[in-house]
Structures are given as structure tokens and as C-alpha cells.
Image (cartoon, grey):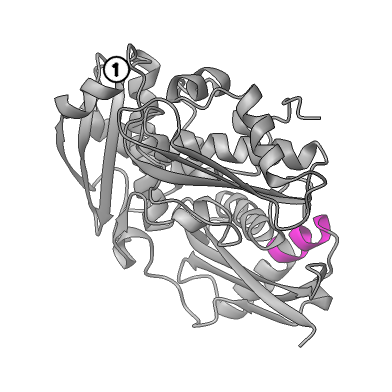
Amino acid sequence: MNSRLFTSECVTPGHPDKVADAISDAILDECLRQDPSSRVACETMVTTNFCIICGEITTKAVVDYPEVARRVIRSIGYVHPGEGFDADTAQIQCRIHTQSPDIALGTCDEIGGAGDQGMMFGGACTQTKECMPLPIALARALISRLTQQVKNNPLLRPDGKTQVTVEYDSQGNVLGIDTVVVSVMHSREFAIDDLREYIRAYVIAPVLERYGFSLNAVKHVHVNPTGLFVVGGPDGDTGLTGRKIIVDTYGGWFSHGGGAFSGKDPTKVDRSGAYLARYMAKNLVASGLASQVQVQLAYAIGVAQPVSLMVDSFGTGVITDEEMARRLLKCVDMTPGGIIRRLGLRRPIYMDTALNGHFGIADRPWEQTDLKLN
């Protein structure tokens, strides 16, 4: 065969796992707003009209955790009593304690060590203007458009998913869009045929046009392929923090490390290291040194400097991968403290990443292309 297909998916802010991510990150934001030195590792689970918040939090902040959770649930759009999950009637419980003193010992500001061991990946490519692979860029753009329609149309509900399959030739060039899938929760009053026509016209077509494609040229389009999607959100499926790690990164195009992002303060390199890896990969591509790059970092708990750095340009580099790594080491402080300072990570900026995406969003600090690598 002279072509291949690659598929990525994305989910709405109202997907149960994203509700959990957003609550965890909203709690992180509130802690950092009051106390920038807060240490937070917050996990959330949501199910039918129930939410439990767990984790290790050491902070001077005074936080009403249930109220933060209700505010998030309300902002996402779960405000319809009797539909299985809503901000006003959901039962919320908390099981929170302070950070382990053994972990705190090696990660205090004086030592500045990493909050855990692990490896993190960041990637960038020239497939889209945001330097993201096209399948995940399209899937996320569809989610953004769908979320806006949920706010505008009272017959739509917050839970939903998108999926995009792109066809490439043997050289990696885009040939076209093979399949688009959109599933969205809705009121019983929204007839399925009307819903499908609405989503095609007001969600799929405008997004494809923005990326230079026509809906008529897509080989397969599926909108709510099983029919009704009335029971959804946490009432239809339990949600957990950190369960959408591929959605949160590159849709499977690049590798993923061992940890999730949401609910973790920036001393946790699962998060801050992945942000730095994206920053470095995007700067390599923006500098014209390669058209596709993956950067891997690895850390040991309590140790400030990374134990390894690897650059893989998949044969697209105009200089060697080793030279790219050398240039990054020369101009980037890769310690947790250095990452936090460069990207300004001790700020309440995280709930929006859970809801609207971590990468490929222009105003994220790790999306800057300000490194001098040439």
C-alpha cells in the first residue's frame, strides 16, 4: 500500500474523566493563587451524582474543596437536576492529607530535586501551524467548536467525543481526511436526524474548512453512530483524574511518559518536564532544524538535573540529533526550578489546560518559540 491511516481522539470538558481533571486542576489553581509554594497531588473521581476528592496537599491556602468542585461542575454545564449529575445536588466528599515528608525532603526549594522519577516526552512537527500532528489538532478543534455549541444550544449536553482519521502517503504527506466521528450528549427533545444535520453543519464543516478541507471530501462521517446519547457524563461513566493522557498530549503520534498531568503542582516533573519537552521540541521545529522532533527527558526523585536527554528528529534534521541535544543543554536549565522559572509555572493556569488542552494552544507559556538555537 502507498498510504496509511492514523487516528486520534479528543473529549469535551464534560467527559467524566475531564470533569475529574478539571476539579483536580481547579483545586491546584486555588492553592497556588493563595500560596505559590503549595505542593499538590490531587485526584478526583466522579460518578452518578457523587464526587470524591483525594490526595496529598501541603499549603498555607484555605480552600473550600467542595465549593471549588461545585463551581467547576457548574461551569462545565452540569446544571440540569434529575439528569444524574449536577452541581447543586451532587454529594462531594474529601480525603486529603499532607505531602509525604520523605518526598518533601528531596524536593524542597533548597535542594530543588524532581518530585518523582520518570520519563517525559514532547513533540512538534510542521503538519499544522500550531506544530501539532494533524489528527489531534483536528480532533481538538472539533471539541472546541462542539463545546461552544453546547453553550449556545440548550438541547445539547456537555459530554462528548471526537475522532479523526487522516490519510498519509508513504512519505508522510497528508492526502486527506478519511473519517470524522463526533458523539455528543443531548436532550431527548433533540431528534437524532436533526442532531446529525446540526453537528455536520455547525461543528464539522467549519473546522475542516479552517484547516483547508471540505466536508464533502471526507470519506466517512459518523455523528452519534449508536443513535441516542441521552445518558452521559458521570451518570453514564465513572470519571478519574489522569485517564486521558493521550488526549492530553499528541493523540498517540508521539510517545508518552509514565504520568498524567492534572492535579499536580510543577515540582512534579510528570507535568513540568513534559511541558519543557514540548517547549524544546517546538523550538527546534520553529528554528528550522527539523520538520518533526521528539524530545525525551528523564529524572530521578530528589535529583535536580535530568538523568537523560534525547532528541529524535526521525531523519528530518538539518543537523544531527546529538547536536540538537547539545544546543538545548547549553541554553535551557532543565532542573525543576529552572523549568518553573522559565515557564512561570507557580501560577493558577492549570484548570484551563484540563478543559481546553495542554499543547498547541497559543497562550500556553511552553508554546513560546523564543530559544536561540541557530
Give the labeled residue for mark 1.
108
SS class, disc 1: loop
Relative vertical location of residue 232 with respect to residue 122 in this rendering, above or below: below
Q: Type of residue at label 1?
A: Cys
Q: Residue at x 83, y 77 (%)?
A: 217
Q: Where, quadrant-wise, is the C terminus in this rendering? A: top right
Task: Classify residue 27 as left or right of residue 319.
Answer: left
On-image quarter of the N terminus? bottom right
Q: Nearer the viewer, residue 309 or 342?
A: 309
Measured as percent of width and height from the top left, residue 132 is found at 69, 51
Asked if residue 98 shows in the view, the reply is no
Q: Position of residue 240 (x, y in %)?
A: 31, 54
Q: State the count of labels.
A: 1
Q: Could you say where residue 44 lies in the image, as x and y percent from the top left?
A: 27, 46
Residue depicted at x 73% and y 47%: 131
Q: Is residue 41 above or below residue 44?
A: above
Residue 6: quarter of image: bottom right
Q: Is residue 301 visible to us here?
A: yes
In the rendered view, tell whether residue 167 sits above or below residue 86.
below
Task: Kindly identify the residue that appears in the image at 81 percent across and 57 percent down.
Answer: 211
Q: Residue furthest bottom?
A: 1
Q: Where does the magenta region start and end?
A: 203-211
Q: Nearer the viewer, residue 97 or 283?
A: 283
Rendered location of residue 70, percent (x, y) = 31, 38
Q: Residue at x 20, y 33 (%)?
A: 56
324 or 32: nearer the viewer: 324
Q: Is residue 209 magenta?
A: yes
The reply, left or right, for residue 66 in relation to residue 5 is left
Is 214 displayed left or right of 246 in the figure? right
Magenta stretch: includes residue 262: no
Towards the viewer: 311 or 197? 311
